[in-house]
Image (cartoon, coloured by chain):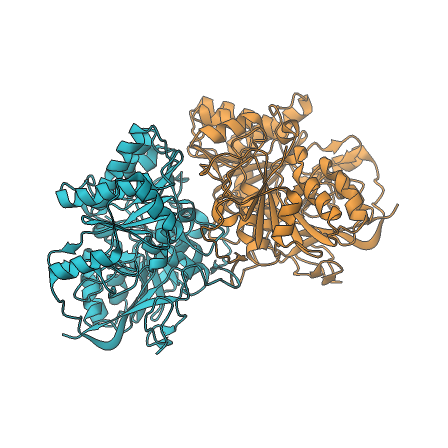
Chain colours: A orange, B cyan
Amino acid sequence: MALNRAGRDVPSQIDGYGPVIPFMGHDARKPEGNRAGGKLKATFNDRTDKTVKDIKEAIRASGLRSGMTVSFHHHLRNGDYVVNQVIDACAEMGIRDLTIFPTALFGVHKALIPHIKSGVISRIMGSVNGPIGQLASEGGLQSPVVLRSHGGRPRAVIAGDVKIDVAFIAAPSADRYGNLSGRLGRSACGSLGYAVTDADGADCVVAVTDNLIPFPLTPVSINQTKVDFVVVVDSIGDPAGIVSGTTQVTRDPMRLLIAHHAAALIESSPYFKEGLSFQTGAGGISLAVAAYVREVMRKRAIKGSFGLGGITSFFVDMLNEGLFERLMDVQSFDLVAVKSIAENLNHVEISADWYANPWNSGAVVNMLDTVVLGATEVDRHFNANVNTEADGALLHGIGGHQDTASGAKLTIITTPLLRGRIPCVVDDVYTVTTPGSVVDAIVTEFGVAINPLRQDLIDAAKEAGDVPLVTVDELAERARKTSGPMEPVATKDRIIGVVEWRDGSVIDVVRQLDR
Amino acid sequence: MALNRAGRDVPSQIDGYGPVIPFMGHDARKPEGNRAGGKLKATFNDRTDKTVKDIKEAIRASGLRSGMTVSFHHHLRNGDYVVNQVIDACAEMGIRDLTIFPTALFGVHKALIPHIKSGVISRIMGSVNGPIGQLASEGGLQSPVVLRSHGGRPRAVIAGDVKIDVAFIAAPSADRYGNLSGRLGRSACGSLGYAVTDADGADCVVAVTDNLIPFPLTPVSINQTKVDFVVVVDSIGDPAGIVSGTTQVTRDPMRLLIAHHAAALIESSPYFKEGLSFQTGAGGISLAVAAYVREVMRKRAIKGSFGLGGITSFFVDMLNEGLFERLMDVQSFDLVAVKSIAENLNHVEISADWYANPWNSGAVVNMLDTVVLGATEVDRHFNANVNTEADGALLHGIGGHQDTASGAKLTIITTPLLRGRIPCVVDDVYTVTTPGSVVDAIVTEFGVAINPLRQDLIDAAKEAGDVPLVTVDELAERARKTSGPMEPVATKDRIIGVVEWRDGSVIDVVRQLDR
């Protein structure tokens, strides 16, 4: 048994995945060779309309065959109709044994389960949020799910680890020559940042839209030089599932306390100053942290440089108030963000590559001061698990967790000490998503544990005086006492999930539940 | 002797160029394989400032060595200081035998001549406008100059024909992490479209700027993920040479007559209708054609879709007047165009790949209705020469000539019948830049010759009644009678210029002058 640098026992070869590159430290692996790109094509003026009549026609035209790899993006989130439509069509056309490479799947994609069972889909590389994750956890997929971060995924494409045969891009707007945008249309989703590298690396690109507009569509998210076919369908998604109305700050007092502690930590740090940059998630605690930070920025008359990540109305308000100069948006979470990216030149669409890929000349995460992240659990080594739940089920993707944790100067994980009777600060996380070497602090309602690697932050917090410092061991101890002894997760040997570190090495695996 | 499909005697191998793929027809060659990309790099948050202290430091950091290939763009035109500064630095550092791969060189680059003579530069792939073209014509370069069109050049990069070791990108604005823009700064040039594919394909990218602005610069022309080093210098160029004040319509009555005939031809064609698209050059006749077309568009209340190409104030006015919906801009010719692209969302920056590359999924030229081009001479086969002058000297680049001629539905070449005593319509052009198979009409002050391949246009022109139709043979005859017999160009056998068709095949060669 050889442990990788995250202390995990990962075999050197995994059935349905292949040879494993063991995780060797968060910035250790260096690439060789050159970027891979999609197929060269000659395109002349004898075909100035790329529209085809339906998805089946596009599949035929694309050359998609059994055994190939197809990619999708998740900007339409739980409102997406495109993945299901495409796979339904493949099934009807007798195409089987597909590897699907979505950025993420959601509840709406439970419609894929029959196609998994019948062998139309044999492998999933991508985040499996919810029902398909549950299915995978119970051994329902032929091959392990491969999880990659938002930056790790484009890295895998440009490094040639994943060859996309056909990319299907849900496009809220398109013109007949294949210029695509997420800004306009009844299914508008704002940024199309996750799809950009797919368009670059795929051998064939099919856009699926419900809003065909005159050529040339501008401004474009993905331009005509990469798009081969355009299919117009009745609807690419359900607007109610695509964007939430508005994202809300938590009202729960315990969660507000956590947020308050996190904000105090940020304010105590050397990164709270003119020109700061900041990312939070769209969760209630994260937004509450943003709200506290905003208050202090106003009070101390500090202006930020940029807000990053999945963008919410909260960050849009900060932009409009002048608290940020720019928003860098890989994913627009709510209606306000969608409207803002369409209208405000300082609200900038960025690709996942630009956002987070560790293997280019520099992603935005490297310029990030502070990120506030969540986790299902963290441990005494500051490792974070965002993939599996307490019962061992693989229910969540990595998102930008690894990338922002690696890039930011101050990485904070906020978590209640327990969720119900389940401890969230433990001795050892069940799955290592993000190693403790890039996590600077764990913030709970019972105090803030700063990673001993960051004595500078500990000193600054002590000096500030209002950060309730604790040790991570104290937190784990307290959680254990409250919860009482926990049953270990019972698993079979079979690996059903492979968690890649953003550089393509394997940081951990997830095994089939024994039920 | 084997002639290629343009009827030219081109050897199968050329010293200093390599094996020749003979031109086989304008849309004949199809690519194989996948797009080539630049080197993969791992970039983490331990280096958040890419600035280096000077050009020499950047050269050292880039790993540039003797024998390598360096690229440049020509958006700063005759105002550019960057090419000379970089090559001066290379010479001082003892680097030799460089292949330089500029999009184009101008008069200001005559400063490179000593470096050519001393062996610092051994090969030039790019347009050589003026003095270096003259030097090449007289045999002053070790290897033939390789000429590519605006679309053929990015094709060569993505097809892997040219591997750029280091791209030097003159950037009118940059931030410290390598986001670049042509819109802002005292050396603003508008679009940076020619440099985009260089940034994509080069193993190392060095930005040279005289205007460092806070991160994150937006909107960007080329983003940080492709840029490795940023050098701040006192000045990247002379604004007076970068952009002209305003571009002017000709006042010469003969040229106005040519423009008038061209406009009549356009109006007679099926492409003069709602939603038309249009490209002209920045020359006096071209602008006069645009002025006439604008008049008719106003009179007949026709609104265009897009104006394309190198953009002048003339097209900006048409955009602002609502005669175009969009401008697609690969190169901004004057101050008005620079200002417009910086402020107007409907004035869109496009890369040379997007503009004109025949080997992607579709360039804008394929959507173009009408293009008005010039030539140094045309012939009875409708072939056009834009590279060599009557004395056989290679003084001009291809520009977008091949690309727009191939892509547009109506390709018009305007030319006086003679320039001085030199006939411009001849039996056979001295150099074939663009084959007659993609040229639809030649327009002179003595009438309009439509290519017999386009009987539809001849019929439409006859029906319109105001297009003075002639045959190309009549034009050539008349030119010959006026000029009297011409001396043939005296050359040596040695090939000093290779004219690639946009697909990478060789359409013609240029031989050393015998003087």
Q: What residue lies at 35% left-to-right and 32% top-to-bottom? A: B344
Image position, residue A195 (x, y; %): 56, 44
Q: What residue lies at 30% left-to-right and 69% top-to-bottom? A: B509
Image quarter of the C terminus of chain A: top right
As rendered, which of A495 and A4 lies closer to the eye?
A: A495
- The reply, left or right, for residue A43 in relation to residue A122 is left
In the figure, A493 relative to A315: above or below?
below
Q: Is residue A435 visible?
A: no
- The reply, left or right, for residue A162 in relation to residue B475 is right
Image quarter of the N terminus of chain A: bottom right
Image position, residue B119 (x, y; %): 25, 72
In the figure, B235 relative to B464: above or below?
below
Q: Where, by quadrant of the figure, is residue B129 drawn?
A: bottom left
| Figure disc tally | 0
As rendered, which of A273 and B81 lies closer to the eye?
A: B81
As rendered, which of A88 and B111 lies closer to the eye?
A: A88
Image position, residue B222 (x, y; %): 40, 47
- The reply, left or right, for residue A378 in relation to residue A185 is right
Image position, residue A511 (x, y; %): 79, 51
Q: Is residue B425 visible?
A: yes
As rendered, which of A505 and B418 lies closer to the eye?
A: B418
